[in-house]
Image: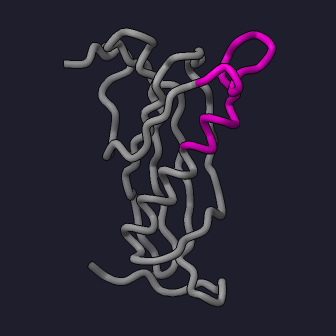
């Protein structure tokens, strides 16, 4: 069982992406770049979006993102996704990033945000999202 910070709660959604933080992903202070974390979050949202839209999606918006805790080399980034709402051609997906600390089972929430994706056809234009 994972040791999760009680004040941070449980991850919301489905585990979608895992990646290990490497030295090339750090700034001069040894912290992992926020952009690296955000990129993994966008990938997770894209995976969840494609599954739900049954086809290609593109990112059109990221709501406010605040970094709560830094990641260090060796931490494992775990990204969780949860489809919040679906419109005709777009959907909002809540995405959380958690760090499983190096050589432990302890996890801390790093950040979260809501990403908006639009389903697009082969022509790159918005298309309706199928009803489940």
Q: Quadrant of the C terminus?
A: bottom left
Q: How many marks?
A: 0
Instruction: Give residue 25's quadrant in the image.
Output: top right
Looking at the image, which residue is at 59% across and 87% down?
A: 122
Drawn side of residue 118 relative to residue 30, left or right = left
* 39 part of magenta stretch: yes
Question: Residue at coordinates 51% horizontally, 59% vertically from top-left?
Answer: 46
- Residue 30 drawn at (x, y percent): 70, 12
View extreme (bottom): residue: 123
Q: Nearer the viewer, residue 8 or 18?
A: 18
Quarter of image, res 13: top left
Query: In which quadrant will I find the N terminus?
Result: top left
Residue 13 appears left or right of 91: left
Residue found at x 45% / y 64%? 49
The residue sitting at 51% across, 79% down in the picture is 89
Q: How is the image coloured?
A: one colour
Residue 86 within the segment the image draws in magenta = no
The single residue placed furthest to the right in the displayed view is 28
Q: To which quarter of the image does residue 118 belong?
A: bottom right
Image coords of residue 114 (percent x, y) = 53, 49
Residue 96 sits above or below residue 46 on the image: above
Q: Position of residue 39 (x, y in %)?
A: 63, 44
Relative placement, left or right, of 43 versus 84 is right
Q: Measuring from the top left, give residue 37's x and y in whole percent.
A: 60, 35
- Residue 108's place in the image compared with 36, above or below, is above
Q: Is residue 14 above or below residue 92?
A: above
| Range of residues picked out in magenta | 22-40
Residue sitting farthest toward the left: 1
């Amino acid at each position: 069982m994972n040791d999760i910070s009680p004040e941070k709660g449980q991850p919301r959604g489905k585990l979608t992406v895992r990646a290990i933080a490497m030295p090339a992903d750090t700034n001069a202070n040894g912290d992992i770049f926020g952009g690296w974390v955000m990129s993994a979050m966008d990938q997770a949202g894209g995976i969840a979006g494609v599954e739900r839209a049954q086809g290609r999606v593109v990112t059109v918006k990221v709501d406010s993102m605040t970094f709560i805790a830094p990641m260090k080399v060796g931490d494992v980034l775990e990204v969780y996704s949860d489809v919040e709402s679906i419109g005709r051609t777009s959907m909002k997906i809540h995405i959380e990033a958690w760090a499983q600390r190096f050589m432990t089972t302890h996890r801390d929430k790093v950040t979260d945000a809501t990403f908006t994706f639009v389903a697009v056809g082969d022509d790159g234009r918005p298309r309706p999202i199928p009803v489940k």
